[in-house]
Image (tube, rainbow, N blue to C red):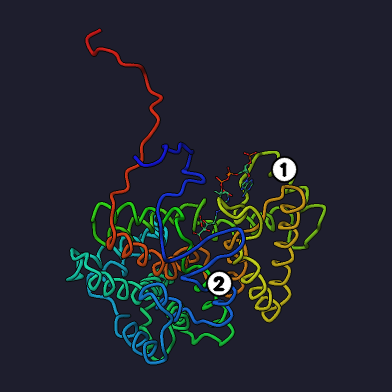
Amino acid sequence: MTSAPTHAKGLEGVIAGETEICKVEQSALIYRGYEIADLAANASFEEVAHLLLVGHKPSADELKHFQAELVAERKLPEPVLNFLKTSGDLVNHHSAVPMDILRTAVSILGHLDQDCQDNSPEANLKKSKRLLAKIPTIIGHMQNSIDRRDFVEPDANLSHSANLLYMMTGEQPSEEAVKVMDVSLVLYAEHDYNASTFTSRVIAGTLSDLHGAVTGAIAALKGPLHGGANEAAMDMLAEIRNDIGHENDDAKIDAWMQTAFANKRKLMGFGHRVYKNDDHRAPILHALGRKAAEARGPEFVKLFELGETVQNIMETQKNIFPNVDFPCGMTYFTMGIPVPQYTPIFVASRITGWCAHIMEQHANNRLIRPRVAYTGPDLRNWND
Ligand code: SDX
């Protein structure tokens, strides 16, 4: 061992590897050298996906070819379609949630991908593009099944973000909605060694396959301490509205927050293991979402005003700041997206970061196997 072992619960502060893909610092969030505000303002999600997966900013021709590859891969094979036809029943009448359905659908896609057991860079890149293209179709068909309606087929004339929105409802999305969705996917795409990405690297580090690593990452992202927080943040705001009514009475909101503090309740969408003040992504999405709310109507503006009051209390009284999931919850609610699809949409974006890390791990692998401090009983004999 070259350096002294570091013992930190939750690996807090431990440098667990190296990556060329992303840098998450209090000062900046960078994808392969490009700062997140620059990307959010100037790059489409398809361009960012190319940057993360292929490794560089695409030329106009490369982007056109990449987009055509994704459009060609949007359709799902029969066994996945058959499973998704049952997904509405599994969600409406059993215990499945959309993140579980998505996890299973990705697993079935692995069984049907002729490159599944091939971890070569070429095969991994092909599989990454197939998953990137197919996950919006899985989300769309799953929502169609939950809504008890026929499947909406992918529209080859729509961009990645527009098609994702279209497939859930069958309605052509507005330009504004597509823009907000596209920026949210750029913001969600990658975030270095977060729990789900680290999960994918641990699985890839055993030389297991990309679909298996993505399946594990989806399970990790589902948790409310991680990606599931965007749904939990909206559920929390709905709970506050349910408790105090829809008139944003500051005194009632503050009283609700004091009760939450007294109960040591974790408020969803706030705090971060790395960012100890603002998450660089949160203000970008908040501004876009608030604009969408102003266009949608007063009820939605009131939701953002409630969120801003909650945020202000957290910042001034607890010095805890919102992460990207807090504005995401309010924004996707304003866009009419069903709450249980918020984290699956996070997957539709983070599949790019996960696959970039899985490819990086396979290309320069070392099994990830940390040590642990034993705190169990001292040595003893079985027959004593
Ligand atoms: C994502 O890692 C990534 O990069 C993730 C992500 C990505 O892009 O991949 O950024 C996406 O997962 C964002 C995080 C989404 N999760 C949530 O919003 C869930 C709520 N947040 C907390 O559970 C918490 O902030 C974590 C889990 C996100 C981070 O927690 P840490 O680093 O383990 O910090 P902690 O829980 O030890 O908190 C330190 C203190 C504690 O107070 P004490 O017990 O020491 O008195 O701050 C308090 C916590 O109670 N605190 C909170 C809080 N977050 C921290 N108190 C109330 N509400 C919160 N949200």
On-image quarter of the N terminus? top left
Among the two numbered marks 2 and 1 on one chain, the one whose residue lies closer to the N terminus: 2
Q: Secondary structure at mark 1?
A: helix
- Disc 1 target residue: 259
Nearest to viewer (mark 2 / mark 1): 2
Q: Secondary structure at mark 2?
A: strand
Point 68% across, 78% down: residue = 291
Q: x%, y% of residue 309?
A: 75, 59
Q: Residue furthest front?
A: 2
- Disc 2 target residue: 35
Q: Nearer the viewer, residue 29 or 138?
A: 29
Q: Nearer the viewer, residue 177 or 98?
A: 177
* Residue 25 higher or lower than 73, as above or below: above
Residue 22 located left or right of residue 246:
left
Residue 120 located left or right of residue 225:
left
Point 36% across, 37% down: residue = 371
Tell me how far mark 2 sits from mark 1, CA to CA: 39 Å
